[in-house]
Amino acid sequence: MEQGSELLRVVRALIQRQHRHATSTNIAMRFRTLWIAATLDRQLAHCTDFEIGDLILIAQERFHIFEPEFGICEHAKRRLMLRNAKEQLTK
């Protein structure tokens, strides 16, 4: 995904916002994470498989290599990126 991509910028901002709200001691701020999650889901629906793979790479950086979440992200990233590469070859 291009570093200057508007979609990437929006998604990253939503992720940062959700982290901020989720760690807040204010209960009202914590409930806002539900709204942000729904907004994030709508934005992600516009992403291509390759862009989702790119976002998984960003998420994967938060996990240690021996955590199961790391393996799940790695598998999903490879699957999405390989599918995109195969589609590009058949065009």
Image (cartoon, rainbow, N blue to C red):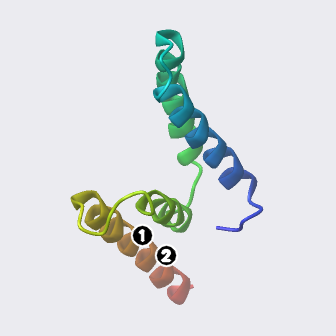
Residue drawn 36% across the image and 59% down it: 63
Q: CA distance from mark 1 to mark 2?
A: 6 Å
Residue drawn 50% across the image and 30% down it: 38
Quadrant for the C terminus, please: bottom right
Quadrant for the N terminus, please: bottom right
Image spot of residue 31 (x, y percent): 47, 16
Residue pushed farthest bottom?
89
> Which of 2/69 is in front?
69
Give me the disc on residue 24: none
Question: In the displayed structure, does residue 64 sit left or right of residue 68?
Answer: right
> Which of 45/91 is in front?
45
- Identified by mark 2, the residue type is Asn
Image spot of residue 20 (x, y percent): 56, 32
Q: Is 22 above or below relative to 81?
A: above
Give me the disc on residue 80: 1
Neighbour class for label 2 at 10 Å: few (<14), some, many (≥20)? some
Neighbour class for label 1 at 10 Å: few (<14), some, many (≥20)? some
Asked if the residue at tag 2 contacts the one at tag 1, i.e. Cβ–Cβ closer than 8 Å, the answer is yes
Give me the disc on residue 84: 2
Q: Please tell me whether mark 2 sits on a helix, a strand or a loop.
A: helix
Residue drawn 55% across the image and 38% down it: 40
Q: Is 14 above or below relative to 91?
A: above
Question: In the displayed structure, does residue 85 sit left or right of residue 11?
Answer: left
- Identified by mark 1, the residue type is Leu
Question: In the displayed structure, does residue 91 sit left or right of residue 13?
Answer: left
